[in-house]
């Protein structure tokens, strides 16, 4: 909290060298007025920290338009008991990165450690999610799956801003062609029509779309590529110090009590219990 400026004292007038008595009622009034003004002027102890301003893309089942979803519910359960409300705005991924790094928002969700560091963002000790990256493809395009190396020479589609072609995991892989799209339906259409060999995305999003749209998976095969700790990434400012401290304390409390698992179960998402085990290191 910024130190308040001192209230300037009035210099005595040239005629006030002698002592004069002040009426008790007037003194009482002025004293009370002073403290009322001071109280109203000073910021409260939670000023600037009674809410957390989240910017994020809208992900079905995770960050829903109505404020529900796995990610939003976790954030609320972390901060609500501390008197901190959650505000949220939906923006594209790259804009969210710029807003948080530029201190225009408090935090963004589901960020990998290496990406947070590249953007100059701060992350807690503990993740709030483990993001499994997966690939889906038609069996008549890839007959035999032999791990990540199977993708070498294949064409791929993914969501705009995910930039999978820059990931260390894919350094040994050369995609013959790749493109970015703005929504899941478009990615599935390009895969179904044979325009691209594979569609790469977060497992949680693939599974959610498959269930919601009742996708017939008989022609397709889905494989998990890797798992990565995902964090709430915070702006590089003083407000984040307290928000991060609260997060690290509360997420462990939620895990220990079983409440975190209950939230995962509610949204039909596999619970990565190992992510919050004592002594666990960042991936």
Image: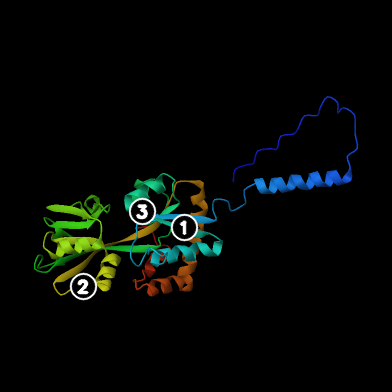
Q: Position of residue 229 (x, y in %)?
A: 35, 60
Q: Going by the image, does 245 lie left or right of 96?
A: right
Q: Residues within 10 Å of mark 3 (few under 14, many from 20)?
A: some
Quarter residue 26 falls in: top right
- Mark 3 — residue? 91
Q: Secondary structure at mark 1?
A: strand
Q: Residue at x 23, y 55 (%)?
A: 169
- Mark 2 — residue? 215
Res. 173 in view? no
Q: Label 1, label 2: how many angstroms apart (C-alpha)?
A: 34 Å
Quarter residue 190 falls in: bottom left
Closest to the observer: 73 or 119? 73
Q: Secondary structure at mark 3?
A: loop
Q: Label 2, label 3: how many angstroms apart (C-alpha)?
A: 28 Å
- Mark 1 — residue? 87
Q: Position of residue 189 (x, y in %)?
A: 17, 63
Q: Position of residue 132 (x, y in %)?
A: 29, 64
Q: Going by the image, does 238 lie left or right of 4?
A: left
Scheme of image coloration? rainbow
| Above-or-below relation of 268 to 197 | below
């Amino acid at each position: 909290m910024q130190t308040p400026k001192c209230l300037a004292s009035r210099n005595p007038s040239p005629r006030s060298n002698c002592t004069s008595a002040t009426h008790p009622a007037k003194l009482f009034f002025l004293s009370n007025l002073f403290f009322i003004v001071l109280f109203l002027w000073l910021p409260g102890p939670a000023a600037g920290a009674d809410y957390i301003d989240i910017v994020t893309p809208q992900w079905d089942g995770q960050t829903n338009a109505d404020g529900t979803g796995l990610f939003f519910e976790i954030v609320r359960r972390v901060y609500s008991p501390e008197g901190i409300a959650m505000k949220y705005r939906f923006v594209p991924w790259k804009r969210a990165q710029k807003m948080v790094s530029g201190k225009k928002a408090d935090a963004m969700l589901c960020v990998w450690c290496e990406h947070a560091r590249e953007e100059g963002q701060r992350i807690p000790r503990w993740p709030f999610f483990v993001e499994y990256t997966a690939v889906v493809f038609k069996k008549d395009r890839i007959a035999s799956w032999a791990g990540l190396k199977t993708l070498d020479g294949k064409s791929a589609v993914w969501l705009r801003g995910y930039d999978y072609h820059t990931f260390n995991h894919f350094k040994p892989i050369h995609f013959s062609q790749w493109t970015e799209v703005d929504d899941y339906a478009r990615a599935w259409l390009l895969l179904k029509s044979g325009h691209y060999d594979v569609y790469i995305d977060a497992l949680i999003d693939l599974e959610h779309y498959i269930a919601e749209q009742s996708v017939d998976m008989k022609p397709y095969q889905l494989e998990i590529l890797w798992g990565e700790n995902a964090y709430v990434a915070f702006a590089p400012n003083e407000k984040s110090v307290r928000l991060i401290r609260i997060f690290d304390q509360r997420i462990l409390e939620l895990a220990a009590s079983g409440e975190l698992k209950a939230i995962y179960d509610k949204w039909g998402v596999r619970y990565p219990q190992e992510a919050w085990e004592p002594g666990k290191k960042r991936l």
